Amino acid sequence: MKLLSIAIPCYNSEKYMRKCIESLLVARGEDVEILIIDDGSTQDQTAQIADEYAANYPDVVRAIHKGNGGHGSAVNTGIACATGLYFKVVDSDDWVKKEAYLQVLEKLRELAGGGRALDMLISNFVYEKEGEKRKKVMHYRHILPRDEMFTWSDCHHFKKGHYILMHSVIFRTKLLKYCGLELPEHTFYVDNLYVFEPLPYVTNLYYLDVNLYRYYIGREDQSVNEQIMIGRIDQQLSVNRRMIDYLVSHKAEIMKNKRMYQYMRNYLEIITAVSSVLLIRSGTEEDLEKKRALWQYLKEKDRRLYFYMRQGIMGSTLNLPGKGGRKISVDAYHICQRIFKFN
């Protein structure tokens, strides 16, 4: 069995996938398997590049070709095909830092031999934003214990805008399979579900304070580009509603651990804030009605959760009436963009 399976979802990725794959090939032998998931690419040489690496590195790389189903479908395929003890997703336009990567593998080897099963390893990620020399590092030094296995109860309070994203995590593979995670097909923004729905099954965590993942932002066609997100707002809303459904339906179980529930509730709050601001930014009456419908959906699902989020600083700001209120909402969103370097 390999130590770590790394899935690389690829769709027409020939321009940048080599950089991603090469950064992962630093590890050889029994440590890593790299699963290049060709998600029905038709417009370039993605499939051929995947086969090339599989032929050149047969002990490390597997090329998996499938019909187009979107990012979530490719991740689902990666989980199903993974044979490693642990599992990570690296998007084809991102990459990892060599020194941190080797440290992560060393730590996973160490923890794999311990008496307690590690469910989730967390590391830092870096926003590689096009045109910016100063890189924003997202770390968890004041939130998570370092150099020890810990549980949710040992975590400190997560501040607004500081969350565990797909770039941060390595899950135990069996946990992902056991929890029944099945990401929706042909839907963007499912990475939010990937780092949300498995959490109630996570008992033992470890934070390794290294800058492993390099998250590239800057392509005009990138899914996190604001105008593209507005154009795909129905997919964002679909993910948002599923997160509401999940938290509400598992609430009794999740609330047994106060810190985990607080974290998941706050994560849902920021996703709902992003959805709301994008709908405001669109400015059409149809999208403003979708914003009202989203908050009404939350209210009907869980009135207590609705009032908590509605009365919080983000909820109250996002629901200010009139054009002036909507301008304040957008201004607050742009401040967050500058601070946290997203979009």
Image (tube, rainbow, N blue to C red):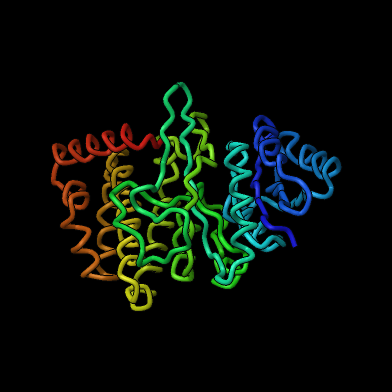
Name above or below for residue 299 compared with residue 4: below
| Residue 286 visible (yes or no) | no
Q: Which percent across, then down, holds residue 154?
A: 36, 64
Residue 128 or residue 325, whichever sits in front: 128
Specify whether 271 is left or right of 72.
left
Q: Residue at x 38, y 51 (%)?
A: 163
Q: Quadrant of residue 244?
A: bottom left
Q: Residue at x 38, y 61 (%)?
A: 241
Name above or below for residue 52 compared with residue 65: above
| Residue 239 visible (yes or no) | yes
Q: Quadrant of residue 30?
A: bottom right
Residue 307 or residue 40, whichever sits in front: 307
Q: Residue at x 25, y 62 (%)?
A: 296
Specify whether 22 is left or right of 259.
right
Specify whether 13 is left or right of 187.
right
- Which quarter of the figure is the C terminus placed in? top left
Specify whether 332 is left or right of 203.
left
Q: Which percent across, then down, holds residue 51?
A: 81, 43
Name above or below for residue 92 compared with residue 107: above
- Which quarter of the figure is the N terminus placed in? bottom right
Name above or below for residue 110 compared with residue 283: below
Q: Which percent across, then down, holds residue 65?
A: 75, 50
Residue 128 or residue 305, whichever sits in front: 128
Q: Residue at x 39, y 41 (%)?
A: 230
